[in-house]
């Protein structure tokens, strides 16, 4: 029986293991380099995303400023138109054949779970006229006047025995809005200079 130990074979196996380990280390190093490159790319991508976010944020700020400016301008125009109609009504408190004794503007009241605001309200001894003013009247706005007429009686029960009429008043009155107002027996009021012009003749009996 041959008990001679093969040291040479062991040496070769160890050498192969060392070489394999070096190759593995080399591949790991290359993999780590690849991972580092991916990390760098992700970092660049994230920077790009952050820049886009900043641009979107700036754009949104610009849009918000435009909305604010437009909303402010629109509100200012509405206030100017309301002021003009109020002054015209106050100068000559008549509408058609109806004469009024008093006029109020921007009435606000909250009671019994109801809250509402009324642009212009004219009264005499037995009649109330609620005038809602807009720069441009659309058909969809007309029915809101009916709701305000109903709310007025609930908010001001002292006028419960008065007749209440409604009117739409605007610088721009679309034909469809005038037709809608006629359907609900509402006055339609336009303006010529500082003079009021009644565009229809609702039944007031």
Image (cartoon, helix red, strand yellow):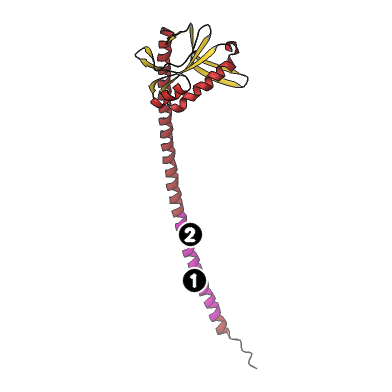
Whole-angstrom CA distance, mark 1 to mark 2, is 18 Å
Q: Is residue 94 above or below residue 8?
A: above
Dot label at residue 50: none
Please provide the residue range marked out in magenta: 12-40
Q: Nearer the viewer, residue 174 or 51?
A: 174
Residue 199, picture quadrant: top left
Residue 72 visible (yes or no): no
Q: Secondary structure at mark 1?
A: helix
* Left or right for 82, reference 7: left
The majority secondary structure of the magenta stretch comes to helix
Which residue lies under the disc numbered 1? 23
Instruction: Residue at 59%, 21% (x, y): give it.
Output: 114
x and y percentages locating residue 54 in the rendered image: 43, 40
Q: Nearest to the eye among marks 1 and 2: give it.
A: 2
Instruction: Residue at 55%, 77% (x, y): give it.
Output: 14
Which residue lies under the disc numbered 2? 35
């Amino acid at each position: 029986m041959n008990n001679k130990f093969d040291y040479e074979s062991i040496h070769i196996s160890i050498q192969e293991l060392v070489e394999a380990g070096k190759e593995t280390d080399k591949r790991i190093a290359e993999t780590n380099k690849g991972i580092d490159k991916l990390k760098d790319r992700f970092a660049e991508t994230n920077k790009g995303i952050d820049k886009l976010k900043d641009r979107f944020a700036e754009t949104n700020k610009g849009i918000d400023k435009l909305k604010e400016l437009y909303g402010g301008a629109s509100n200012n125009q509405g206030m100017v138109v309301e002021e003009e109609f109020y002054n015209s009504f106050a100068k000559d408190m008549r509408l058609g054949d109806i004469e009024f004794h008093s006029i109020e503007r921007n009435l606000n009241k909250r009671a019994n779970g109801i809250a509402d605001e009324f642009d212009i309200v004219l009264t005499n001894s037995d009649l109330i006229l609620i005038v809602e003013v807009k720069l441009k009247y659309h058909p969809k706005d007309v029915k809101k006047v009916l709701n305000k007429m109903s709310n007025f009686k609930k908010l001001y029960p002292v006028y419960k025995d008065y007749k209440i009429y409604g009117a739409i008043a605007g610088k721009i009155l679309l034909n469809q809005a005038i037709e809608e107002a006629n359907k609900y027996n509402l006055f339609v009021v336009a303006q010529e200079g500082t003079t009021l012009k009644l565009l229809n003749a609702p039944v007031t009996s």
